[in-house]
Amino acid sequence: MSTAQPPTPPFAPEPEAEPTTPDQPLDLAGIGIGPFNLSLAALAHGVPTLRTAFYEQRPAFHWHPGLLIDGATVQVPFLADLVTLADPASPWSFLSYLKARERLFPFYVAERFHIERTEYDAYCRWVSEQLPGLHFGHRIDAVRWDHDHELFELDFSTLGPDGEAVSPGRTHARHLVLGVGTEPHVPETLRPLADAPNVPVLHSADYLEHRERLLNTGHVTVVGSGQSGAEVFLDLLRHRPLGAEGLHWLARTPSFAPMEYSKLGLEQFSPDYTRYFHALPEAVRDQLLPGQWQLYKGIAQETITAIHHELYRRAQQGGDWPGAVLTPGVTVRTAGRIAAARLELHLEHAHQGTRTRHTTEAVVLATGYRERRVDTLLAALDPYIRRDSSERPRVDAQHRLVLDPLIKGSVHVQNAERHTHGVGTPDLGLAAWRSAVILNSLSAEPVFPLPSRTAFTTFGLQPSRPGDAAPQRPAAPSAPVARGSGRMHLPDQRTGRTPTRT
């Protein structure tokens, strides 16, 4: 059982990180503080002999602020918080947060298995504002390996209120973990418009910031068939005038398809499947991933139902088909401006082989996210990083980059290993488990007991089990260590019932 308790009363993180010396290095330095590294920091707080620090250039924690749409829920149960699935007794659990906010009984009565995104964001901020060793407003500028001291050397800048560098610093660590997350993806055909000033082409990641402007725009086009596209389309549809919706929803997929939400299908988000996937040959993994898109790129059934209900309601009340067009199977070939307030998209339908021009006044790109490149940050380590046939970093079973043996320390990655660990990589439900795997790999003895089996499905004729994959190289701190987490959707607002994964 964890004995560590949150500080009382709450305190703010240190305003400036203290530099370290090679004589007193950190055991683990984290770069980036999103949900995954926050999970790792929270679990590491229960390991008293492990010295850690995490650095984030943003001034505070915020989780996808542009998509905190009213009513949107996280698509994993609240048990997929930062710590529970590895340490249910942790003081940093979601239930601990509710208790601290005196909302435990209201939550119990509400019977909500899936919480709203705004509440998940508030919970993570509660952890980030109390957990020691988190340094916001600190940008890591360079990472090097010090061969003489066998340590990683990190240069950082403390940032001012406007994001300008105020003062430099340097820290040293035996091991690293990269949790720099993903970044919005804008297709090349639309990048010139998205990058141009004062052109209403934006990524869904910035939706709420521009929502009022979009609601007052005559015609809006949403591009993208995933959950974010569905949420944005539904939110705009619900708040635009009856009979004058002025909406177009375009998707490259052949249909607006539901997310795979069957119980056995969801076992592909289990540690068992992660181990199975990692053990497959590289070519097989690359062939599997595109076919699994409905596991993470589909739309929640509740959102699809809510969209159809809103369209039907408008058709019934208005006496005619609503002014909203939903077209799957379409690719945006090129795009440009044709007037001060008009945009033109050149479309192609894959199955018909037809092309047309589509005019609109604003475009919301729900085109997903891509793993943020760390080549610049790790430029000094690039000669030591082992890569696969596609020039991607190789990642071992403990989520470590495979490095040249000359590098004695480990570089762990979080949410940058889908090509080696599968569709569960960005899933919040595996956050605590992955954090525990990383912390166990830093210790001579496991500090977090993990289950040997996590799914009813047996993946493969020779199931992969914990320990089957031998570590690429040892990664233990100087002394043994003693122990002391998306997906989201909008509910059907007619009934107020909690969305489930069934």
Image: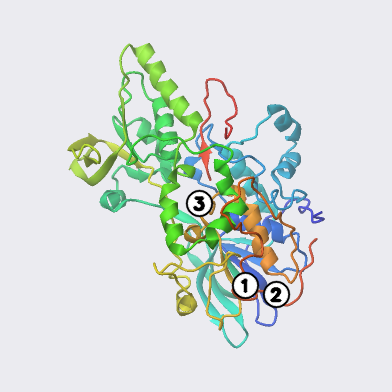
Residue 218 in percent (x, y) is at 29, 29
Left or right of residue 147, residue 382 in this image: left
- Within 10 angstroms of label 2, few (less than 14), some, or many (20 or more) residues? many
SS for callout 1: strand
**Residue under label 2:** 477
Left or right of residue 368, residue 413 in this image: right
- Identify which amino acid the numbered label 1 is placed on: His
Q: Nearer the viewer, residue 498 or 400?
A: 400
Q: How many marks?
A: 3
Q: Nearer the viewer, residue 248 or 268?
A: 268
Residue at the extreme front = 461
Whether residue 323 is situated above or below residue 411 in the rendered picture:
above
**Residue under label 3:** 423
Q: Nearer the viewer, residue 273 or 8?
A: 273
Residue 223 in percent (x, y) is at 33, 40
| Camera sees residue 118 | yes
**Residue under label 1:** 175
- Identify which amino acid the numbered label 3 is placed on: Val
Which image quadrant for residue 22? bottom right
User: Disc 1 to disc 3, how far (Cα)?
Assistant: 26 Å
Please say if the residues under marks 2 and 1 sit with CB atoms less than 8 Å apart. Answer: yes
Q: First in sequence: mark 1 or mark 3? A: 1
Which image quadrant for residue 353? top left
Residue 38 in percent (x, y) is at 62, 56
Pick the quarter of the image with the C terminus.
top right
